[in-house]
Amino acid sequence: QGVQHTKTMATQSCLRKLMAPSTANHMGNVHGGNILRLCEEAGRIVATKYSLGQVALVGASQTQFHSPIHVGEVASVSATLDYVSRHAMRVSLKVEAEHLESGRTRETNSSNMWYSIIDVKPRADGMTGVEMIRGERPIHPLHPSLVAPDAASELKKNAASAARLPLSTRSPKEFPVTLQVTPDVDSISNHPFVSAGYVLKLMDEAGAVVAAAHTKHQCVTVLLDKVCFRTPIRLGDLCTVRAGVTYTSSRSVETVVQVWKTELPGGAEKEGCGSICAVEARFVFVALGDNGKVVEVPELPPDQRTIRWNAGAAKHEERVAEKARAKL
């Protein structure tokens, strides 16, 4: 019983943090990016404890934003490891907000995040520093009683989706540059690599900027539909975050956000090395009026639509159908 208890404890973790004004917008709602960063940290803790090695986020799916968290509330992120393959782990996350004075709690977010065990070795290209590669050491199987029944099919779906998104060195013209940063030491997790939570926060901010520019209203995150991490970002790399509106319904805005990395050794771009798309994700936002209520979204003009419009429309119809089924 003691051994089984230890195994169970290694698959669970809880991260709690008081939400300060610096984490929120002018309405007092905590930015979605800050919640995503907390979720990634909690998931990384569980995956590291279970695998007893360094891990990295490789993807996430269907991160739902059910209700906002407000300044002064405590965000509690519960992380549970519920699937393990030979080299990947899924962590199921649930976020609750607690009002300290009344003690009332409510669920605000849910997500599934996938981690892979990694090794850090000297760079093979002769450059100074190290590189992150997928670890070859197999992960210990999870006890059958702890395995989620839907995880295996989700893993296959994510792998197929990632295979259709090869590393790109050409930036789409429809995505304006919205943010450029060089991550500092506060952004790293496994030195000298930037944490996935930090990257997700940047992407959420960029998506909110282009959504607000389109709607002319404050926008808040309601869904991180899918994210795929293709290559790690090193401390000191130049990160260019590109975001564009790809689909609009009457009540929501879908944006695709990409993070392009450029190596800057010694403060100058490496000769012969262009930018590479390191991460891509789809975010869905809603616009809020001055009273904090959701307002209608202007339609994206036909001349600004790309081939991503049809994919966005299909995804929107799927989400509407899922909500209808959930109400039955």
Image: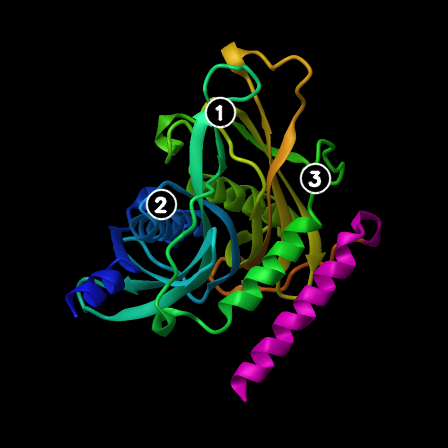
Left or right relative to 298: residue 145: left
Q: Residues within 10 Å of mark 3 (few under 14, many from 20)?
A: some
Is residue 286 highlighted in magenta?
no
Q: Which residues are magenta?
A: 302-328
Residue 175 locus on image (x, y percent):
70, 39
Mark number, residue 182: 1
Depth check: give the residue in front, 280 or 253: 280
Among all residues in the image, which is located at the extreme right? Answer: 303
Label 2 SS: helix
Q: Is residue 204 left or right of residue 282?
A: left
C-beta proximity under 8 Å, tags 3 and 2: no
Counting other residues with Cα less than 10 Å from the Cα at mark 1, is it few (<14), some (14-19), or many (20 or more)? some
Label 1, label 3: how far apart the Cα atoms are: 20 Å
Amino acid identity at mark 3: Phe
Which quadrant holds residue 295?
bottom right
- Give the spatial CA distance, label 3 vs label 2: 26 Å
Earlier in the chain: of badge 1 and badge 2, it is: 2
Q: Position of residue 55 (x, y in %)?
A: 40, 43
Tell me the kind of residue under disc 1: Thr
Q: Residues within 10 Å of mark 2 (few under 14, many from 20)?
A: some
> Which mark, residue 23?
2
- Residue tagged 3: 175
Total numbered circles: 3
